[in-house]
Amino acid sequence: MVYEDEFGGEIVYRQPTNSSEVQLLLTAAWSDPFCAYGADGNEHWTLDLVRQWWAERQRLAGWIDQVRHQWSVSDRADERDNAAGLVEFGRYLDDGLEADLRNYGLWLDNRRPRQPREALPSLGSS
């Protein structure tokens, strides 16, 4: 989890990959006084919208770099700590997110997981 810079809200930048991460995410969601965690993304996303978002990912990469640099030299310990989370977010954006989004795109179009040897949809140019 990382934090955005304007209001300090939490950003879940990838889905949990094991039971410990699921527990951490659920604990954060249950204790969130603003009810900002949602489980309704499938009602709002389509494969075409995922492709559009992916085509503009350099905006996100720029934000990550800018805030990471700002926070890494901050006088505040929490911001310096959060800069490390942004490093991980940037790594995931560079290596991992595309594959996860392609799997999600297949699920959005078919409402089922990928079958063995089934091709995943393209997100456009990488």
Image (tube, rainbow, N blue to C red):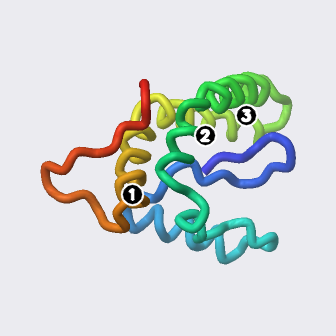
Kind of residue at disc 1: Thr
Residue drawn at 43 percent across, 46 percent down: 101
Task: Mark 1 or mark 2: name the one nearer the start of the chain.
Answer: 1
Q: Secondary structure at mark 3?
A: helix
Packing grade of label 3 (10 A; few <14, some 14-19, many >=20) is some
The picture places residue 15, in percent across and down from the top left corner, at 48, 56
Marks 1/3: CA–CA distance? 26 Å
Kind of residue at disc 3: Arg
Residue drawn at 47 percent across, 28 percent down: 94
The residue under label 1 is 17
Viewer-side residue, 113 vs 7: 113
Viewer-side residue, 13 vs 39: 39
Task: Mark 1 or mark 3: name the one nearer the start of the chain.
Answer: 1
The picture places residue 18, in percent across and down from the top left corner, at 37, 62
The picture places residue 7, in percent across and down from the top left corner, at 86, 49
The residue under label 3 is 80
Residue drawn at 58 percent across, 39 percent down: 53
Viewer-side residue, 95 vs 57: 57
The residue under label 2 is 85
Packing grade of label 1 (10 A; few <14, some 14-19, many >=20) is few
Task: Mark 3 or mark 2: name the one nearer the start of the chain.
Answer: 3
